[in-house]
Amino acid sequence: MRARTRLVTAAVGAALLIGGLSGPAVSKDAAPDRKDAATEKKVLVFSKTAGFRHDSIPDGIAAVRGLGAAHGFAVDATEDATAFTSTNLRKYDAVVFLSTTGDVLDEVQQSAFEDYIRRGGGYVGIHAAADTEYDWPFYGGLAGAYFQSHPAIQPATVDVEDRAHPATSHLAAAWERTDEWYNYRSNPRERAHVLASLDESSYTGGTMAGDHPIAWCQDYQGGRAFYTGGGHTKESYADPAFRQHLLGGIRWAVGSAQADCRPENGYTPIFDGTQTSLDGWKQAGPGSFELNDGTLTSSGGMGMLWYAAEELGSYSLKLDWKTAGDDNSGIFVGFPASDDPWSAVNNGYEIQIDATDVPEKTTGSVYGFQSADLKKRDRALNPPGEWNTYEIRVEGERLRVWLNGVKINDFTNTDPARSLEDGHIGIQNHGADDQVSFRSIRIKEFGAGAGAGKELLDLPVKGD
């Protein structure tokens, strides 16, 4: 909620909307126009092979260069491992391992790359990047899993698990495509955040017992790592959906887009994008939410769609949201069952969505009570038109908020008239001028007692 005063944010929005990724060039195309060279992102594509060599590598290099030309980043491409020195790697915001195979770096070069990642560098692994450096444990952890085997090239259904990450936000819940589908020696799910997995019933030759991640991301020893198992075929790099998949992975790896890449396990969807998953929800007050392509978008108001099926105690609530522009909404927690949306305002707490209000009433704030850490919030926030992920964690009377994996608020209720220990959750439809969309609302409930939430608290968390 907020007063209707709006602030001019065009300059900030334009800066945030730079979709670019950039990099110099060892073998270099003509450089794109550079309005601000100081903020340009730089990417190195590395495609050395010491084993099987994919004939799609030139297509992959051309695709990344094409993405750079279209989105404002330069690209260097090399197969010379001597590029892996501390001095040279500092030029780059991410290194793309494009279907590398075998042992491609010596120990000195490995050490330089490890240092690069630990200083905040980005890694993008494509396809056979998982068939690389089997005797280098740091790399195995960075890639997330090693290749084991593959069946013949064939169509398959990719289940998109995260529709907020920039690598997958453009995709439908099921992505039909043809590629060479790798089986992996281990499952990365416990260590990395899975973005998409294979439906093993949709093709033959899958060996991962029905849980078959195929794209994932993670924060790894100070750096960012994204991997996709796609990209064996030449046709992949001409496919607009796959090119956008690569672009989103690179944008995240270089820090031009934000996402929550912490491992995520044990959550139960309470809205999964289907009409039937709304059976436990009720609309309070005027306005509504429209369901389209698995997404709820607010219309009219002031109202609220609330989850009436269950009263919650200690829990982690995760959901994905985006604004169309300078729009207003919020997530209410800790309020009693009521068909009056003002009951949530007066008895619960609202985690605000609205980038252009006063600190205690802006995105990430506990509305009217406590501002977010605005510096952390601003670094973590994606601009209008792009998806963000909130985690709202309630334990006793303590309420914490993560935005795209970064903790931005830590609030404790001391008002005897309110309590977070039992209550409902809801999403706000603020008014006719506000269009805010939500996807993938999920809950992880904690057990009662001193150990509540221990599973999540034991995980490495950015900003905590």
Image (cartoon, rainbow, N blue to C red):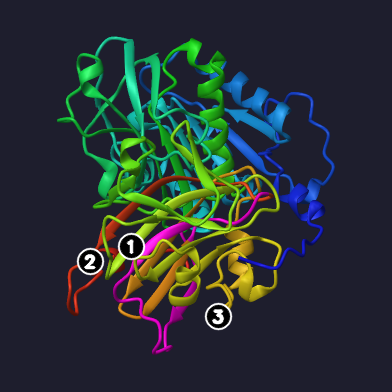
Neighbourhood count class around disc 1 (C-alpha, 10 Å): few under 14, some 14–19, many 20 upward? many
Q: Which residues are magenta?
A: 403-432
Kindly indicate whether the residue at mark 2 contacts the one at mark 1 (C-beta within 8 angstroms).
Answer: yes
User: Closer to the camera, 138 or 449?
Assistant: 449
Residue 347 location (% of width, % of height): 43, 76
The residue drawn where x is 42% and y is 89% is: 414
Query: Which quadrant would the C terminus be assigned to in this image?
Result: bottom left
The residue drawn where x is 57% and y is 51% is: 86
The residue drawn where x is 74% and y is 51% is: 13
* Label 3 sits on residue: 369
Residue 316 tag number: 1
Tell me: residue 134, above or below residue 463. above
Q: Is residue 360 left or right of residue 132?
A: right
Label 2 residue SS: loop
Mark positioned earlier in the residue sequence (1 or 2): 1
- On whether residue 413 falls in the magenta region, the answer is yes
The residue drawn where x is 32% and y is 41% is: 277
| Residue 133 seen from this side | no
Residue 323 location (% of width, % of height): 61, 48
